[in-house]
């Protein structure tokens, strides 16, 4: 791999992480549907929910604490975009808390429609956020050369596979 190919990888890796997070949410939705159909165990569903929520939180925290400061330093004109993305992160965090609470309470108060609505709402929020982020900052990430990121991928570029 040439050094200029390495530079474009950060933005491409972000898109890969977004794809992975979309897939993880789809799996969580399938698990919820299976639970309500009597085919999934609640314990596994809760574990999947916590794993997904933790991964999405880690991704957004990594952007807020690592990627966005790097982008803002190199591309100050993107600071308003980065602030908007941070606001989205707080909305996603609120949605994750609601989803976690619903899944945690399934054995006491099963509301299939409510859980599905929350997942659908989170999916819509994630999709608009990811598309906006990809459109606005991927090229900036592709232009960055952060030696530390080459040695050790930052949290916002990690998937479940990268942790193993």
Image: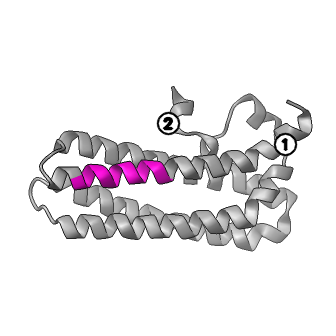
* Whole-number angstrom distance, CA of label 2 to CA of label 1: 23 Å
Q: Secondary structure at mark 1?
A: helix
Instruction: Answer above or below: position of 149 versus 104.
Output: above
Q: Main secondary structure of the magenta part?
A: helix
Q: Residue at x 53, y 65 (%)?
A: 127
The mark that comes first in sequence, 2 or 1, is 1
Q: Is residue 83 visible?
A: yes
Q: Does 82 lie within the magenta span?
A: no
- Left or right, residue 14 beside residue 102: right
Examine the image and state in which quarter residue 7 appears: top right
The quadrant the N terminus occupies is top right
Q: Residue at x 19, y 44 (%)?
A: 40
Q: Which residues are drawn in magenta?
A: 22-33
Q: Which residue is mark 1?
A: 7
Residues under numbered marks 2 and 1 in contact, where contact means CB atoms less than 8 Å apart: no
Q: Residue at x 86, y 57 (%)?
A: 74
Q: Is residue 57 visible?
A: no
Q: Nearer the viewer, residue 10 or 22?
A: 22
Residue 47 x %, y %: 29, 41
Examine the image and state in which quarter residue 115 appears: bottom left
Q: Which residue is mark 2?
A: 160
Residue 10 x %, y %: 75, 45
Examine the image and state in which quarter residue 29 appears: bottom left
Residue 144 x %, y %: 84, 48
Q: Nearer the viewer, residue 17 or 103?
A: 17
Q: Nearer the viewer, residue 102 or 14?
A: 14
């Amino acid at each position: 791999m040439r050094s200029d190919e390495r530079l474009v990888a950060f933005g491409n890796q972000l898109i890969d992480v977004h794809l992975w997070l979309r897939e993880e949410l789809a799996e969580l939705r399938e698990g919820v549907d299976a639970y309500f159909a009597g085919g999934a165990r609640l314990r596994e569903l809760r574990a999947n929910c916590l794993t997904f929520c933790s991964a999405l939180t880690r991704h957004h925290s990594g952007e807020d604490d690592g990627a966005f400061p790097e982008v803002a330093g190199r591309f100050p004109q993107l600071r308003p975009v980065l602030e908007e993305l941070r606001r989205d992160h707080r909305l996603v965090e609120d949605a994750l808390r609601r989803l976690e609470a619903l899944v945690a309470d399934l054995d006491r108060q099963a509301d299939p429609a409510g859980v599905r609505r929350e997942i659908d709402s989170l999916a819509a929020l994630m999709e608009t956020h990811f598309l906006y982020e990809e459109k606005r900052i991927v090229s900036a990430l592709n232009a960055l050369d952060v030696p530390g990121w080459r040695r050790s991928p930052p949290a916002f570029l990690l998937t479940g596979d990268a942790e193993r």
